[in-house]
């Protein structure tokens, strides 16, 4: 199968499954925020954010290394799986001990601790599942990633809605996530053992040393990354309490709902970028440039439209109890745009073996974010946390772009930016005048206006098709295992 067909096949599986998954999860989040209230939702949000910080121990910076190495040499899969499974068993024990010890040291109330204990198991199970899914990604068999995500989403949404409907509260709601994570782990374990590698344990200390050495920069980068993605929720919990966390998290969930596009796009593109770094620097840059362009085209209208419609979105989704979330959402929608761009920048940086540079960038971003959060939360509350996140994302984008440009070439920003900005300006006017008529009308009308202007201005050219043809021709005879 050609690379072109592989990209479109994988993108099709992932986007279809993720749209379905995001709809299910967003429905669950909206129902949960309304049912649990700001305090209950704040405890759940804190439990998720707190335990996710300990993913740094389970991941150890290895997933990107696994994907990159196996994508380049499929024969490594058996040895990698067996060694990494044993490594993750040890890491899981350390992780859970840290989760329990730290939360008790912070002296949180018993109900918050119990929620954390449950989500601790979720994090560990998900870490094992991500190991297996990294194998599918390396083999460019994204259908199995898609099936895994759908299964987990269906289970957690079904159980979550059921326990909320029955009035069971935060303990049972957290347990729904645990059961879903367990089902997903068993599914990915089965698929891996059947199609990719025998499940077992192996100790190759030379390999362990090699992987840990390679993964160390990414491990430190993950530490920094989790800090600047999660520290806002943790600091808000400590400084302002559960209700404020619930209000902020409600706004943040809207952003989570829209960033699946760059997440999935990067999953598909990363193995391709990794290969082209070894095979064709010209095709590497072409792929990077077009990927960046597409993410800007998609992210810009979502951010501008979200800003204009923030009031209606919050009131429709969450109700008047969360009206304060509007102010945070108007800032966070632009974080969404930066995330779109940063996913492509980051994956390009790692594909060209610049994990050391990423360690420095993420370290600087983490330090900046912690400082900004402390200062701005004290001055502006949860809105300050939103501004801290936005400023950090802009800094990160600029820093990554600097290093990627040094290794490749600079992007033609004028040709990338001008037409989408013109299109979004026209779209913004239309959405602004339609917002009080009906948000159901404003959203599709805005999309039609935006993409209509892009077509009229010929933002999409024959170069796009030509690029994909050149990529396909470059590796036309490569067989996907």
Image: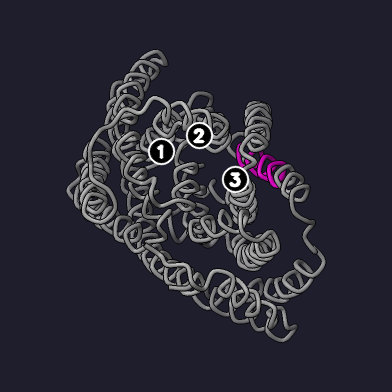
Badge 2 or badge 1: first in the primary sequence = 1
| Front-lying residue, 193 or 94 | 193
Marks 1 & 3, CB-CB < 8 Å contact: no
In the picture of the structure, the residue carrying the numbered disc 3 is 350
Compared across the picture, whether 300 is left or right of 24 comes to right
In the picture of the structure, the residue carrying the numbered disc 2 is 233
Q: Marks 1/3: CA distance? A: 30 Å
Does 157 lie within the magenta span?
no
Tag of residue 458? none
User: Over which residues does the magenta segment extend?
Assistant: 385-397
Which image quadrant: the C terminus? bottom left
Residue beneath the point at 58% across and 57% down: 273
150 is higher (above) or lower (below) than 87: below
Furthest-bottom residue in this view? 456
The reply to whether residue 376 is in sight is no
- Report crowding for label 2: few under 14, some 14 to 19, many 20 or more residues within 10 A (C-alpha): many
Q: Secondary structure at mark 2?
A: helix
Which image quadrant: the N terminus? bottom left
User: Whole-percent x and y of residue 206?
Assistant: 42, 27
| Front-lying residue, 402 or 376 | 402
Badge 1 or badge 3: first in the primary sequence = 1
Question: Comparing marks 1 and 3, which lies closer to the viewer?
Answer: 3
Question: Comparing marks 3 and 2, which lies closer to the viewer?
Answer: 3
Marks 2 & 1, CB-CB < 8 Å contact: yes
In the picture of the structure, the residue carrying the numbered disc 1 is 45
Quadrant in the picture for residue 144: bottom left
Furthest-left residue in this view? 166
User: Whole-percent x and y of residue 268?
Assistant: 49, 61
Badge 3 or badge 2: first in the primary sequence = 2
User: Whole-percent x and y of residue 371?
Assistant: 67, 26
């Amino acid at each position: 199968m050609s690379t072109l067909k592989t990209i479109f096949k994988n993108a099709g599986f992932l986007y279809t499954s993720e749209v379905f998954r995001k709809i299910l999860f967003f429905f669950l989040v909206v129902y949960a925020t309304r049912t649990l209230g700001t305090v209950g939702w704040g405890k759940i949000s804190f439990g998720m954010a707190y335990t996710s910080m300990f993913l740094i121990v389970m991941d150890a910076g290895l997933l990107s290394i696994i994907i990159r190495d196996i994508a380049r040499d499929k024969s490594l899969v058996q040895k990698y799986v067996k060694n990494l499974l044993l490594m993750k068993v040890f890491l899981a024990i350390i992780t859970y001990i840290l989760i329990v010890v730290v939360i008790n040291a912070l002296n949180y109330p018993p109900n918050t601790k119990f929620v954390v204990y449950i989500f601790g198991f979720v994090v560990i199970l998900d870490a094992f599942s991500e190991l297996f899914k990294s194998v599918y990604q390396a083999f460019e068999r994204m259908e199995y990633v898609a099936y895994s995500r759908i299964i987990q989403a269906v289970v957690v949404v079904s159980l979550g809605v059921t326990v909320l409907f029955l009035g069971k509260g935060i303990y049972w709601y957290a347990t729904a996530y645990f059961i879903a994570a367990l089902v997903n782990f068993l599914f990915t374990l089965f698929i891996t053992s059947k199609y990719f590698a025998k499940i077992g344990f192996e100790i190759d200390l030379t390999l362990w040393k090699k992987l840990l050495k390679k993964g160390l920069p990414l491990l430190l980068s993950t530490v920094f990354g989790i800090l600047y993605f999660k520290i806002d929720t943790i600091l808000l919990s400590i400084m302002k309490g559960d209700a404020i966390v619930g209000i902020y998290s409600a706004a943040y969930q809207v952003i989570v709902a829209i960033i699946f596009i760059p997440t999935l796009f990067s999953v598909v593109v990363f193995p391709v970028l990794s290969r082209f770094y070894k095979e064709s620097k010209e095709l590497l840059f072409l792929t990077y440039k077009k990927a960046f362009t597409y993410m800007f085209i998609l992210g810009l209208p979502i951010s501008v439209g979200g800003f204009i419609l923030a009031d209606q979105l919050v009131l429709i989704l969450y109700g008047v109890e969360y009206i304060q979330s509007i102010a945070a959402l108007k800032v966070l929608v632009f974080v969404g745009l930066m995330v779109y761009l940063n996913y492509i920048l980051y994956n390009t940086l790692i594909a060209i073996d610049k994990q050391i540079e990423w360690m420095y960038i993420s370290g600087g971003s983490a330090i900046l974010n912690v400082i900004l959060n402390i200062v701005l939360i004290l001055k502006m509350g949860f809105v300050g946390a939103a501004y801290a996140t936005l400023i950090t994302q802009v800094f990160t984008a600029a820093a990554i772009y600097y290093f990627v440009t040094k290794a490749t070439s600079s992007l033609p920003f004028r040709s990338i930016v001008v037409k989408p900005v013109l299109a979004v300006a026209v779209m913004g006017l239309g959405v602004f005048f339609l917002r009080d008529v009906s948000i159901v009308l404003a959203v599709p009308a805005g999309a039609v206006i935006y993409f209509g202007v892009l077509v009229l201005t010929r933002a999409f050219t024959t170069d796009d098709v030509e690029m994909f043809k050149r990529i396909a021709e470059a590796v036309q005879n490569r067989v996907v295992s």
